[in-house]
Amino acid sequence: MRTGQQNTPPHSDDSPETAAEQRGARRAVTLFPLLVLLAGALGLLSPGSFTGGAEAVPYLLGVVMFCMGLTMTVPDFRSVVRRPWAVALGLAAQYLVMPGLGWLVAQGLGLSPQLAAGLILVGCSPGGTASNVVTYLARGDVALSVSVTSVSTFVAPLLTPPLTLFLAGEFLPVDTGSMVGDIVKTVLLPVLGGLLVRLLAGRAVERALPALPWLSTATIAVIVTIVVAGSAGTIKSAAALVFLAVVLHNGLGLALGYAVGRLSRLGEPAGRALAFEVGMQNSGLAASLAAAHFSPLAALPAAVFSVWHNVSGALAAAWFAHRDRSAAARTRTGAGRPADSGAADPAGSADSVPADSGPAAAGGADNAESAAGPHSAG
């Protein structure tokens, strides 16, 4: 999640520290989609080279989640205690909005049973950790973002399987018991293991933090390569429809997540955080579960989602930041500031817990970032 001193005052927007952190975060959300695209192209062009690779996907996901655990610290969970209502709202939106949208988009586009189940599984997965760094870039409530990501990950074994059964069971059989076991083994235990290692060997882990995002990014890229290779024969006929489904799913999730935050009167920074928490998913987990429980083709929506949600998240963050700069410029020129211009302190609204000043340190750029603050992965 975050690294460095906890609850430190945020740097000013013009400080060298903030500029460096933002450059690192932008590199992360720019390079990750490119690397994943290259990985997908490799799987598409040479599928035979990765035959049998599906068996390694759960272990690869475990590496990503272990990196996520290494970036966690106990203070990351303070916001859960200090603002339980905000975290609970984010968690509810995460596990209600995206699963429902997945089902609606699948029905609306008439997706095949395997693609429909795969898209719904993406929606039923916990939030993607790339949301933390994108929230930072958008000047949102990073503390809230980190807390919701953490809690949604820990409760995934309890919520993802039954939601998948309820919404995707009409398309394909869903073995919830086996799915619970897989999530525990590939998500919960690695995250807890990483957190334990961080607590026992904090200084050694901190020295390794700069390398963790790239390790996670490389691992996610390998997962995408295997997923694409497994369904290379049908991708050409389904690619356009899958891309449309993913864009609709992600875009509507971002919009509804933002609306939930604003309508709940949590403030503009929290609204931005919830937009990314709801709209950005742990697509690595979805790909792993789809490949293991459905088919390689069912994992295709997750592979596409892993690229697209980083692109859309970066674009949305840039738009929010541009809106803030425009509002600040109007204020400086005497035009006056609108009542709710959207200008947001990276630490959150006045009643929010101060966020750490930097972008995330690991978990993969959705998993990839710099080692200064919120992490990314999935």
Image (cartoon, helix red, strand yellow):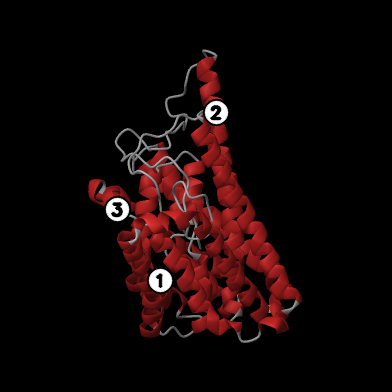
- Amino acid at pointer 1: Val
Q: Quadrant of the N terminus?
A: bottom left
Element class at badge 1: helix
Residue drawn 68% across the image and 63% down it: 37
Give the number of the mark in front: 1 or 2. 1
- Amino acid at pointer 2: Arg
Element class at badge 2: helix
Residue corresponding to mark 1: 187
Instruction: Work out how far the residue at label 1 is from the one at label 3, CA to CA, in angstroms.
Output: 18 Å
Residue corresponding to mark 3: 77
Outermost residue to the right: 45
- Location of residue 273 in the rendering, given as x and y in whole percent from the top left corner: 43, 46
How packed is label 1: few (under 14 Cα within 10 Å), some, or many (20 or more)? many
Left or right of residue 303, residue 63 in this image: left
Residue drawn 42% across the image and 49% down it: 274
Instruction: Work out how far the residue at label 3 is from the one at label 2, CA to CA, in angstroms.
Output: 31 Å
Residue drawn 61% across the image and 87% down it: 52
- Amino acid at pointer 3: Phe
- Location of residue 114 in the rendering, given as x and y in whole percent from the top left corner: 57, 79
Image quadrant assignment for residue 180: bottom left
**Number of numbered tags placed on the structure image:** 3
* Residue 143 vertical position relative to residue 47 in the rendered view, above or below: above
On the question of residue 53 being in view, the answer is yes
- Location of residue 251 in the rendering, given as x and y in whole percent from the top left corner: 55, 53
Residue corresponding to mark 2: 325
Give whichever of discs 3 and 2 has the lower sequence position: 3
